[in-house]
Amino acid sequence: MKEYSFEKLEVWKTSKEFVKHIYCLTNDFPNREKYGIVNQLRRAVISIPTNLAEGSGRTTGKDKARFTQISYGSLMECLNLIIISNELGLIDNESCQSLRSEIEIISRKLSNLRRVQIQNPKPLNY
């Protein structure tokens, strides 16, 4: 079976694992948050690897970098929602710090990927 280019990206693999962590964590949120923070956090977190996958289908580095930047924005949205969830008592301090560590790793990987994509603005021949 063919492996697509995004499947080879470490940042895609890492962000996919982050999706699983967020989904498991939000399973324990109160039902009253099902259509609030849970929905928003899940939509934001799934957007991270999804935009990396979508961007991999673009031909120029500049186009790819735009989708990587969107992924980064979604990551920051997750951080904001995690901070709010912690302040509301939905996430304990230990879980919050663990998630922040994951976000820091993904953030660095996204920044590095974007830098490489911008440095290679021409279409790649596959």
Image: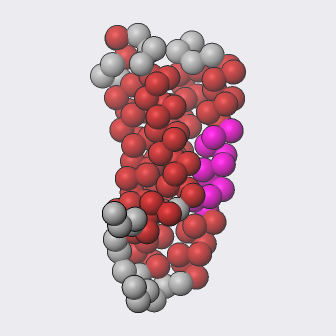
**What residue is drawn where x is 30% and y is 22%?**
35
Residue most extreme to the left: 35
Return the x and y of residue 83 as percentages of the image width and height. Answer: 58, 28
Q: Is the magenta stretch mostly helix, strand or loop?
A: helix
Vertical position of residue 90 compared to residue 107: above or below: above
Q: Does the magenta stretch include residue 110?
A: yes
**In the figure, is residue 95 to the left or right of 118?**
right
The quadrant holding residue 31 is top left
Query: In front here: 20 or 55?
Result: 20
How many labels, in total? 0
* Residue 103 position (above or below residue 81): below
In this rendering, does residue 73 appear at all?
Answer: no
Quadrant containing the N terminus is bottom left
In the picture shown, does residue 31 fall above or below 62?
Answer: above
Q: Residue at x 36, y 38 (%)?
A: 43
Task: Work out whether residue 18 can be spotted.
Answer: yes
Q: In this view, does 17 lie above or below 33?
A: below
Residue 105: x and y, percent? 66, 48
Please give the range of residues in magenta.
101-111
Q: Tell me the quarter of the image containing the C terminus.
A: bottom left
Q: Is 116 placed left or right of 36 in the picture?
A: right
User: Who is closer to the viewer here, 76 or 54?
Assistant: 54
Residue 106 within the magenta-colored segment of the rendering = yes
Residue 5 place in picture, x, y as percent? 43, 68
**Image x and y of residue 52, in percent:** 43, 59
Q: Residue at x 46, y 79 (%)?
A: 61
Kindly give the residue lying farthest to the front in the view shown: 1
